Amino acid sequence: MLQDPTRVEQFTAEIADMKLPDAASSRDRVLLRVGVALMIAGVVIGVVAYTLGHGTTNPLQQRDAIVIAIIGLTVAVVGGAVFLRYSMAQFLRFWLARLSWEQQAQTDRMVEAVRRD
Amino acid sequence: MSLFNGSANGERPRLGKAKKRAPTSAPAPEVDLLDDGPVPILELRGVRAGYDGIDVVHGIDLSVTAGKVMAILGPNGAGKSTTLKVVAGLLPASSGDLLIAGRRVNGARPDDLARRGLCLIPEGRGIFPNLTVRENLWMVTHGGGRDLDAVLERAVERFPPLAPLMAQTAGTLSGGQQQMLAMARGLATDPALLVLDELSMGLAPIVVDDLYARVRQVAAEGTTILLVEQFARIVMDVADEAAVMVHGRIVETGTPHDLEASLSQAYLGG
C-alpha cells in the first residue's frame, strides 16, 4: 500500500476530467433533431408549393407546384418516421433492459428451485 | 475532494499484507487509504460482457484497492480475459458499472484510459515483433514527454536481462524476454493500474517463476496490479487478494490462501 499518492491523485483527477463519449445516445439525439427538421421542412415546402400554385393560372406551373407539394409531404413523412424511431429508442432500451432483467431473475429463481430439490 | 490523504505518521494498522512489501528505492510518502475503509481504484459492479450478444461474464462484482495486487484465478474459459478487456475499455460491458478511481467510465475509449495510467499487458504480450527492443521502448516516449534514456535506464534496472538485447528484434526474443519487454514498456508509462493477462501463457515454469519474482518487485514498489492467471499456485505469494472465477461468475474472493479449497473445486469441478 505504498502507491505514490501524487500518482494516484493525478490518476483520480485525470479520470474525473475524462470526457466520456456516448456514441449511441449522441447519434440518437442528432437523428431525432434531423427528424424534427425534416418535418418542419416538409411543411414549409408544402406552404411554398401552395403559394406557387395559387399565384399562377398557368397549369404547367400549377402541376410543378403539385409535384413540389408531394415532395414536401414525403419529406415530412420521412421526418416523422425518423423522429418516431429515435424518440422511442430511449424508451425501448429501458424496456429491453427491464425484460432482460426479469428473464434473468426468473432463470435464477428456477435454478435456485432446482438446486433445492 | 481528495480520496487519498497522506497519513500523518505513516502507520497503517489494518494493512497486514503491506508489511511484506519492501520499501521503494525513492521512498514515496505513504497513502492512507483506509480512513473510511479501502478505497477501490477499480470497481466492477454487476458487470456483464460478451461477444456477439452472448454474455460470457455474468454480472461480476470486483474491487481493487490502490496499492494492492488482485488476482483473478480460474480455469480456461472462465471469462477472466474478457473481464480484463472490459477493465481496459477494449470491450464494452453489456450491463453493469465499471468504476475507475470512483468514476463510472463505461464507454471510455481504451486509449483514453491508457493515457491516464491504466496499462494492460495483454495475453500474447502485444510487443512490436519487427522492431528492436530499443525501438519498442522508444514507442513509449511518444506523446508522453518521456525521455528515452530514462525509459531505457529504468527498463534495464528492472529487467537486467534486457540490457544486452537492445538491438535485437523483439520477435526473435524468447517468450520470457518478450514478456519482460512488454512489462518494461508498460511500466515505463508509470501506470497507476497495471493489468496483466496470463503472464505465464506459453512459458516454461522456470521463466514464469522469474517473471513473477519481478512482478513481486513491481508490487513492492506500490503499483496497483490486477492480474489474471490460470495457474493459481504461481500467484499465491504475489497477490494480496484473489477472486475465483468460474463460468463467467466470481464464486469467491479472499486472500489467496483462504481460497485454496475453492480453487480445487473450480479447477476440478468438485
Image (cartoon, coloured by chain):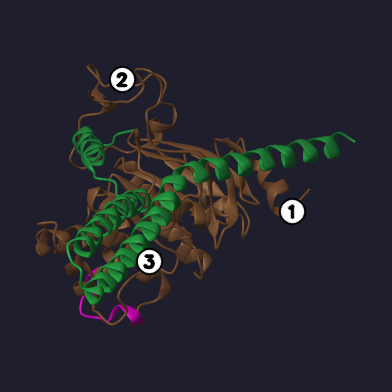
Chain colours: A green, B brown
Residue B205 versus residue B44 in the image, above or below:
below
Q: Earlier in the sequence, mark 2 or mark 1?
A: 2
Q: Nearer the viewer, residue B18 or B202?
A: B202
Mark 1 burial class by Cα count in 10 Å: few <14, some 14-19, many 20+: few
> Which residue occupies 33% across, 25% down?
B33
Q: Secondary structure at mark 1?
A: helix
> Which residue occupies 53% across, 41% down?
B242
Q: Quadrant of residue B223?
A: top left
Q: Quadrant of residue B164?
A: bottom left
Which residue is tagged 3?
A: B179
Give percent across and percent down for residue B180.
34, 64
Give percent across and percent down for residue B163.
23, 69
Q: Nearer the viewer, residue B106 or B222?
A: B106
Q: Earlier in the sequence, mark 1 or mark 3?
A: 3
Residue extent of the magenta highlight: B163-171
Q: Which of label 3 and label 2 is nearer to you? A: 3
Which residue is tagged 2?
A: B11
Give percent across and percent down for residue A30.
29, 52
Q: Does residue B74 appear to the left or right of B65 in the view shown?
A: right
> Which residue occupies 39% across, 51% down?
A83
Please tell me if label 1 and label 3 are on a single chain: yes
Residue extending furthest right? A117
Residue B93 versus residue B53 in the image, above or below:
above
Which residue is tagged 1?
A: B268
Q: For residue A3, say whether it is visible.
A: yes
Q: Quadrant of residue B189?
A: bottom left
Mark 3 burial class by Cα count in 10 Å: few <14, some 14-19, many 20+: many
Q: Nearer the viewer, residue B51 or A64?
A: A64
Q: Secondary structure at mark 2?
A: loop
